[in-house]
Amino acid sequence: MLDWPTTSRHWSPHQRYATGDVLLGLIARGWQITAIQPAPIKNRAKLHLITLQKGDDNLSLSVLDGPAIHKFTTSC
């Protein structure tokens, strides 16, 4: 079972995108980023498609662009 972050902003897998603080919460819980790609521009906001892995679990989510994820997107 995946351990979703409960601190900071609430997010569930049913939402279309997450925010940077959700990504930072996942990383703090042991998830590792395996891939970052720019999302196709269909929305007004810039999104990043991020793939994470923790043990045998994989998670893909769209993350809203912002200062919290710039250090990850510029290093990949």
Image (cartoon, grey):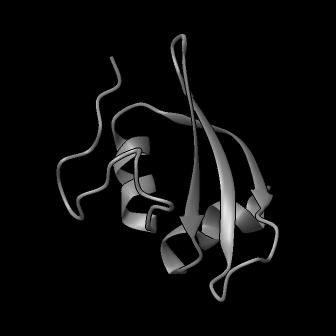
Q: Nearer the viewer, residue 15 or 29?
A: 15
| Quadrant assignment, res 47 | bottom right
- The quadrant of the picture occupied by the N terminus is top left
Residue 31, placed above or below residue 62: above
**Picture quadrant where residue 51 is located:** top right
Q: What residue sits 68% from the left and 63% below the top? A: 48
Residue at left offset 41%, top offset 44% = 13
Image coordinates of residue 69 in percent, x first then y, are 56, 67
Relative image position of residue 52 (x, y in whole percent): 59, 36
Frontmost residue, 5 versus 32 = 5
Q: Position of residue 76 (x, y in %)?
A: 80, 55
Asked if residue 7 is positioned above or below residue 39 in the image, the reply reads above
Q: Residue 24's image quarter?
A: bottom left
Q: Give the residue displayed 41% in from the left and 57% down from the top.
A: 15
Does residue 6 appear to the left or right of 73 in the view shown? left
| Residue 37, horizontal then vertical, whole percent | 79, 56
